[in-house]
Amino acid sequence: MTPLGFATWRALFGAILLTVVLAVLRQRGRPFIGPRQVPRRAAAALAVAAAAGVVLNLAIFIAYGRITVALALLAFYTYPAIVAVVALVIERRRPDRVEFLALGLALGGMALVVLGQLDPAAGLVVDGLGLGLALLAAVAQTVYITTSRGYTAVPTEQAATILLWIAALAFVAIGLAAGSFDAIGEPFRSPAAWPYLLVAGLLGAGFPSLLFLVAIRLIGPVRTGILAMLEPVTGTVLAALILGETLGPIQVVGGVLVISAGVLLQRVPSPAGAPPTHPLQVPAPG
């Protein structure tokens, strides 16, 4: 499938899943904010985050097709460092020493894990556009994370659902405008793609989008970005278990470094700040 077609179905299935979650939580008493109740600043922040999400997905999926996945991941996972810089410059909050140490450990570990995937025989494929798109995805992810503080008035699950629906509709609109709508309909011609798209949408977009936003609101963008670097470690381990790929000692060391960064962050309380608005707490049915 093309990057546009894959991104469309991934966002659509994720949005459908979160819509179901949203409906269940409303029945259990979760607050719901109507469209007219959303403050203008929150609506603007949601729009910026949605646009960043669209750019992020298209850029990174196209980058995967132009350069090696390892190189794309190395470029993309610079975003936790960018988030830390944004927190320092814009939010006027200096990340503490623990966060700086954890960031260094996680970046170094992620690099070892990803570089261990490179095949020396295949060579390193460097394409300027592909590398630029991966870096653009990192910037878009930074915007997505930093703007999340602007719509805390909207309950977490509702915000995540809105963002995925906007992304799905935007991808469809892009397909129509670019004359590439046939790419979105590819699964109807190749039914074997449906299981993969369902997994990508439910486990790769729906729940992760919700939990990622929950984490940002509970522990902040800097720590969330650092902990998110467990993603390439998890992918490498799953590739070894499911696909039979070799897990080298360098990758093991890298994984240990990333996990150590996560443990370090969890052992030290988050910096004092305002309590999160609308954390994902579900009241017991009465």
Image: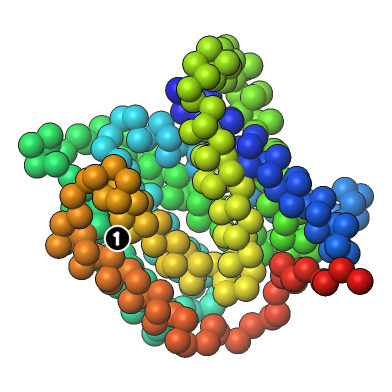
Residue at 16% x, 57% y is 248
| 71, 235: nearer the viewer | 235
Rendered position, 13 above or below 25:
above
Which residue does the numbered mark 1 point to in the structure image? 110
Residue at 22% x, 64% y is 252
- Residue 234 position, x and y percent, is 37, 57
- Residue 136 position, x and y percent, is 43, 43
Where, quadrant-wise, is the N terminus in this rendering?
Answer: top left
Q: Is residue 132 left or right of residue 280?
A: left
Q: In this view, does 17 lie to the left or right of 24?
A: left
Give the SS element for disc 1: helix
* Residue 165 makes an appearance in the image: yes
Rendered position, 59 above or below 182:
below
Amino acid type at circle 1 is Met
- Residue 75 position, x and y percent, is 33, 49
Q: Is residue 257 left or right of residue 52?
A: left
Image-quadrant location for residue 79: bottom left
Residue at 46% x, 50% y is 139
| 197, 58: nearer the viewer | 197
Rendered position, 95 above or below 56:
below
* Residue 46 makes an appearance in the image: no
- Residue 144 position, x and y percent, is 57, 53
Q: How crowded is mark 1: few (under 14 residues within 10 Å), some or many (20 or more)?
A: many
Image-quadrant location for residue 157: bottom right
| 261, 47: nearer the viewer | 261
Q: Is residue 25 left or right of residue 169?
A: right
Where, quadrant-wise, is the C terminus in this rendering?
Answer: bottom right
Coloring applied to the structure: rainbow
